[in-house]
Amino acid sequence: IEGLRVKGKPAFSVQYHPEASPGPHDARYLFDEFVHMLAESTGR
């Protein structure tokens, strides 16, 4: 398992080895999703 998401809750988790897929933007989508969840939970 490399990640999980909690259905109905603003929660997710990932675990992986960055050296397996190098690059400065490989995990950017995770940060985008995190910011999106924060905005939804605060009504912004």
Image (spheres, rainbow, N blue to C red):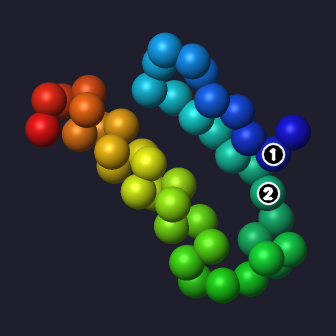
Please tell me whether mark 2 sits on a helix, a strand or a loop.
loop
Q: Position of residue 17 (x, y in %)?
A: 82, 65
Compared to 5, does 15 lie above or below? below
Q: Is residue 19 left or right of residue 10?
A: right
Compared to 16, does 38 lie above or below? above
Judged from this view, the residue extending furthest toward the bottom is 23
Label 1 packing within 10 angstroms: few (<14), some (14-19), many (20+) = few
Q: Position of residue 43 (x, y in %)?
A: 14, 29
Residues at marks 1 and 2 touching, judged by CB atoms closer than 8 Å: yes
Pointer 2 residue: 16
Label 2 packing within 10 angstroms: few (<14), some (14-19), many (20+) = few
Compared to 28, does 39 lie above or below? above
Q: Position of residue 19 (x, y in %)?
A: 82, 77
Residue at point 79%, 77% (across, down): 21
Q: Is residue 28 left or right of residue 42?
A: right
Residue at point 62%, 73% (across, down): 26
Compared to 35, does 5 lie above or below? above
Q: Identity of the amino acid at label 1?
A: Glu
Pointer 1 residue: 2
Q: Identity of the amino acid at label 2?
A: Tyr
